[in-house]
Image: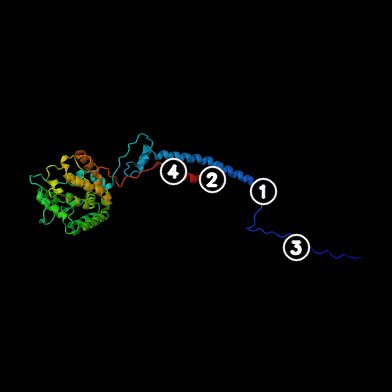
Amino acid sequence: MFTPPPSPPPSKSSEMPKLEMTNDTPTHANPSASPTHSYQSKQKYTLTLRWTIILVPMALIAIGVSTQFFIHPTAFDAFSPTSIYGWKSWTKSLTDWSLHERHKPTSNLLRLAVVSDTSALPFIKRSTPSATPTPTIPINPTLPTPFPQPYDTTLSSNFSTTSCYNFFLNMTQTDALRSCRPFSLLLTHSQAFIQVQDDINATNTDVWGTCNTALSSNQCDLNMAWFASSLRSSCATDLSNQNLLAVNALIGLQAFDLMRQAACSVDPVANAYCYVEAVASSDPSSYYFYQLPLGQTVPQITSGACNSCTKSLMSMYWAALSSANATSLTGLQATYGDAATKLNNECGSLYAQSTTVASSSAPPSVELTSVGGAWAVLLAMGVLSMLS
């Protein structure tokens, strides 16, 4: 009987290749998983909708409350450097929605010290009027020895820091100050300079001495700038505490160049110093204008101030306030506008430039749009992060 040969084994090529899953292998959807995926999507949508319903009204309420808070008068006071409200008083004041009086613009701290307490300021003495006519500018006069110096009396010990007291001791003894004979400090802080004004000829000699120094005007400018910088550093606490001696010294140092020009201005008709004419005049109206850079205001004046010297002086002041150094002339910034108005009222509208001088340290303003916008952006970002 014939036995058939065994069947050949199946060819390896006909076998189905074995698939191995890798990270790069695309995953195909399993039809049987479709119901589960649909359920999860629906659940996520429901959760998102629920958070939206909760968070969006909360965000709108928060924006509304914050806007109402930041337009409240007390909130504005909180951003003001002169605020009188404490944190403990906010609860009561925030419930008061009565009309709020607008705060008047404030000046910088140095300027406030100049004009707020005039009783504490050094008195600018004026000589007793005499029948002696104003002397002409002298030619190489014999100067007094010693020449009047600022702070020639005993310094007060009313300093907040030892460093400030030592600064004044050192400054008043150094030739860098004494050789420059600063008119801006002599006018208010030199007993010898003040007392000699009873003698118009002696005053004339002293003014000549302030205008003709061994050191050049430029070198003296550098010296005063150095002293002013050192004073800010050594007397930082005293300046912060509004120590009038420190504050007025800084104002005088910064006004050195301007007041030297003012003291040395000449009346070309009389060939005399304008300042000496003001000292000798029986009407003190012109004299008052020399104290403006030191922060002292002009009182009521008469037509005696209507002269070429005063007009030239105010032009000099206006030019200084329009220069790059205007920010350092805090005393003049505080007094010029009112003085120009009084002078124009008495002498004519074109006598002095009367445009208001803007303060360099105006209190910062708070814009409602910026506050509300910031809250809206922050809350919107929070909502989006929760929903993502």
**What is the residue that sits farthest to the front in this orientation?**
269
Dot 4 or dot 3: first in sequence order is 3
Q: Amino acid at mark 1?
A: Ala
- What secondary structure is found at the residue carrying circle 2? helix
* Residue corresponding to mark 3: 13
* Residue corresponding to mark 1: 33
Residue 144 coordinates in the image, percent (x, y): 11, 55
Residue 93 coordinates in the image, percent (x, y): 36, 37
Q: Measure the alpha-carbon separation of dots 1 and 3.
A: 34 Å
Q: Amino acid at mark 4?
A: Gly
Dot 2 or dot 4: first in sequence order is 4
* Residue corresponding to mark 2: 387
Classed neighbour count for the residue bearing mark 1: other residues with Cα under 10 Å, few (<14), some (14–19), many (≥20):
few
Q: Amino acid at mark 3?
A: Ser
* Residue corresponding to mark 4: 373
- What secondary structure is found at the residue carrying circle 1? helix
- Judging depth in this view, the residue of 220 and 45 nearest the camera is 220
Task: Check whether the beta carbons of the residues at disc 2 and disc 1 lie within 8 A of each other.
Answer: no
- What secondary structure is found at the residue carrying circle 4? helix
